[in-house]
Image: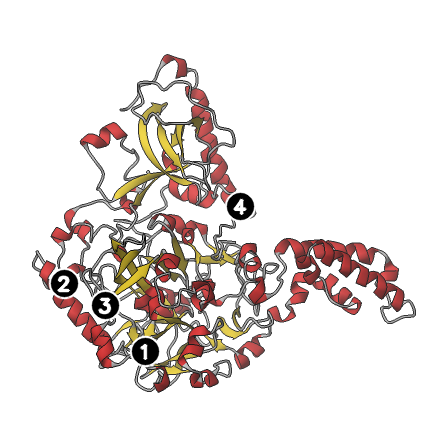
Amino acid sequence: GPYQTNTLSLSRNKTMSSTKNRCHHHNWFKIIYIFLQLTFYFSLGNGDVYTRYDRDAYIAARYGTKGNGGDDPPPINIKDELRKIDNGGEDRHPYDDPNKCTTYLALSSIPQSGLGMYTTIPYRKGEQFPFPEIGILLQEKSHHYSFSSTKQESKKLLNQYPWAAQTLTLGQHEVAYGEAIVPGLGMLANSHLGLVNMRHSELWKVQPWRDGTDSLYRTDSLTMQDVGRGAHSSHGRVVFEAQANVGAGEELFVSYGDEWFTGREELLGIVPGESHFKEADALLRTFSNDKQNIEDVQGGNFVYRNANYKKLLSDADAKDKRLGRALPNNLQDVPNALYMGTARFSAQNSIRSIEWLEENGACIDNIVTGVSTIPQAGRGAFATRSIAEGRPITTTPVVTLERDELHLWEKVKEREDGGAVMELVGHQLLLNYCYGHANSSLLFFPYAPSVNFINHGSVENSNAEIRWSKLPYHKAEWLDATLYEMKDKLKTGLLLDIVATRDIRRGEEILLFYGKDWEEGWDQHIKEWATTDNEDVIDNQPYLNLTERLGVLTTNDLNQLERNPIVRTKEEQSKDPYPPHIMTRCHFKPPDNCISLTHISPAYDVDSELHCRSRWVLTFDALQLHPCTILSRENIEGIDWYTAQVVEPAKGNDEAILHLVEFMARNAILFVDRPYSKDQYARGVFRQPIGLPDGIMPLHWLDITNDEKESNEGDGPILSGGENYATAH
C-alpha cells in the first residue's frame, strides 16, 4: 500500500493452561488454522491475488522459506549464473546472449524527466528484476540536517529520492525515523503513475541477509575480525519485480505514490495519478459513443465537435486539474488516446525499438552483485560479460550533495536561553558510498544498478577507474558552474563512466582504487580498532561475526519458525531472557472500535493501563507491526496461540493505546533489533567517502584547505569530544 511522509512511497515484540470454558473452541481453532494455511497455500497459484495480508510473506514464514543463519538463501553466484548462460536449454537467463544488453540508460519518455531505464527483454508479471540492490537507511535526516549551515533540506537534491523506511526489511524499526536510499530501479527509474510496471518484491522482506546486528553491542569481545562492522549496509538484497507484464523496449516505471507528486507541484507541475488516467479513459469512451464526436475530425462539423471536446476538457479541469491533465489537449488526438489509453498516449516513447536503445542508450547491465572475494567487504560487483580494456563497464548518473547533509549531531548541554549546544559525532552510512575530494565540500552519490557494490582494490589489483562520461546526456557544461550553483541544483545532469583499465573476464570481480586518502583513513581506522582486539586472529580461518563466535542469536535466527517455533512469555523471559538488543513486535491491526476492559484476569501480568481487548486478526501490513509483550501461550490441539500486550502508537494529540490481544498466531510475532543497536549506528565505525582520481573534481570546487581539513572533522570517524559544535534553538 502507499505509505508516505514526504518520502517515496512503496506503490515509492506464564503459560496458561486450557480451561473448560474454552474447550469447545478447540475444533474451531483447528479449522480456522488449517483454513488460513490452505487459503494462502493455494493462493500462490493466483498471480492476481494481492492483499494487505501479503500472502507471499505468510507462506514464506509459515512453510519455512529460509531466512538467515545456517541455512541462508543462496546468494546470487555470478559463476553459477554465467554457467546457466553457457548451458542454455531450460536454464534461460537475461544473459543468454552475452553480447545482448538487457538494460539501458536512455532519455526518459516523460518530458523534462531526464534519463530513465529501459529493458530489451520481456518480464512476466511477478518475475524478479535480476539486479538486487543495496538499501541504505538514513537516520533522522531532517533532524540532523537542521543543524547544518544552510538548514534548507527540502531544497536539496537528495531529498527527492528517499523511500519510506519499510521498503527495507524491518527498516522502520531501526531508528526513531528513517528513510531508505535504494539505487538502481529505486532511483534511476522514473514514475509514471499510469504506467507503473515494477515494484518492490514483498517476498524479499522475509529473506534479509544475515548481518550480525549485535556484533558491536558486545564491545568487550571485539576483534580485528570486526574491523569492518558497520561500514556497509546490512540491506544488501533489495529486489524489484514486474508488477505487470513488461515488453521488450519498454521503459521501467515504479510508483512514487500520489503524495510525492502533489507535494511537489511547485517544482513538477500538475501530474495525473493512476485513477485520473482511468477516469480519463472512461470519459473518452463516453465521448466517442457519439460517433459524430469522433468520426471525420477534419470534416464540416469539426467546429461543433471541437467545441464539445473543449467543454469536456473544461469540465474535467474544473472537477480535478489532475484529471484535466490526463486528457489529450486536442480533438485530433482523441482516436490515438482511445486506442493506446490516455496513460500510454501521454508517454508515447515509453516503448522504444531495440535499435534506438542500442544507438542512443548506455548499457548498464555489465555488472551484478555477488558475495565479494575480499574478506570483510560483504558483497561485490561482478562482470556479466567480458569487457575489453578502455571500454565502459557501466555509466551512472550522480546525485550532488554537501558533506554536511550527512552529519550526525548529538546534544552536549542545555543553554540558558532554552537552546542546546550540539556536537558533531559522526556521519550517515551513505557517506561510505559517496565519491568526493578531500578538499571539497561537494560529494557525488552514483545510483546506476549494482554500481554501489564495487569494492576497493589496490593500485596493482584494481581493474577499473572513473572518468566523466562522454555520452551526450552528460552535462559537461555544469563543470564550469560555481560550487554554490552545483549545491543548489535540484536535478541531476552529471554522468560518470566506470572504465576497464585492463581486459576483464566474465565472472571477475570489479575493483576500483578508492584513492590514497581512503587507504590512509582505513589504515588509521585499523590502528584505532586494534586497541579493542581481545582475541588473536587465526590465519587462514573463515571470518565470523561476533554473534557466530559467541553463539549469540540474531533476530534473523529467532525469526526462523522451524528453529524457534515457541516465543517465551514475559514470565519465562525473566528466567531465560533474550539478548538485550532484541525486542518483540507483533503484526496487529487495531480494531476500529475499542472494546474496553471491564476486568483483567489475574492470570495476566499486565500493565494496569490496558485500554482495549480484542482477538488477533490476520495481517502482515508493514505499518501494523507494533511493540508487544508476550503474556501467555496456550496450546490448542497442537497449535500454539499467544496473548500479547500490544502498543498502538500515539496519533496526533492522542495517547498511545495498549491492547490485550488474544489468540495470536506465532507467525505474527517478529523479533527486531532495538533502535540504534545495529552496527551502522555505533560510534567509531568506519566512515570515509571514496576518493575521486586527480583531474575529475574541478579546481574551483575545492573549497577546503589542507589546514581546514586537519582542524575540522576530516573524512574519518568522528568520536565524542571533538571540536565541532552547532547551536540549536
The first of marks 2 and 1 along the sequence is 1
What's the residue type where badge 3 is placed? Answer: Ile
Residue highlighted by disc 4: 50
Residue highlighted by disc 3: 374
Secondary structure of residue under mark 1: loop
Residue highlighted by disc 1: 440
The quadrant of the picture occupied by the C terminus is: bottom left
Q: CA distance from mark 4 to mark 3?
A: 40 Å
Q: CA distance from mark 2 to mark 1?
A: 27 Å
Q: Residue at x 13, y 65 (%)?
A: 528
Please identify the quarter of the rendering in which residue 295 is found: bottom right
What's the residue type where badge 2 is placed? Answer: Trp
Q: Front-most of 459 and 639?
A: 459
Q: What mark, if any, has residue 529 been given in the picture? A: 2
Q: How many marks?
A: 4
Q: CA distance from mark 2 to mark 3?
A: 19 Å
251 vs 721, left or right, is right
Q: Nearer the viewer, mark 2 or mark 4?
A: 2
What's the residue type where badge 1 is placed? Answer: Ser
Is residue 197 visible from the viewing direction of this image? no
Secondary structure of residue under mark 2: helix
Residue 301: % across, % down: 91, 67
Task: Examine the rendered structure and indicate whether residue 505 appears above or below residue 228.
Answer: below
Q: Residue at x 22, y 44 (%)?
A: 553
Secondary structure of residue under mark 4: loop
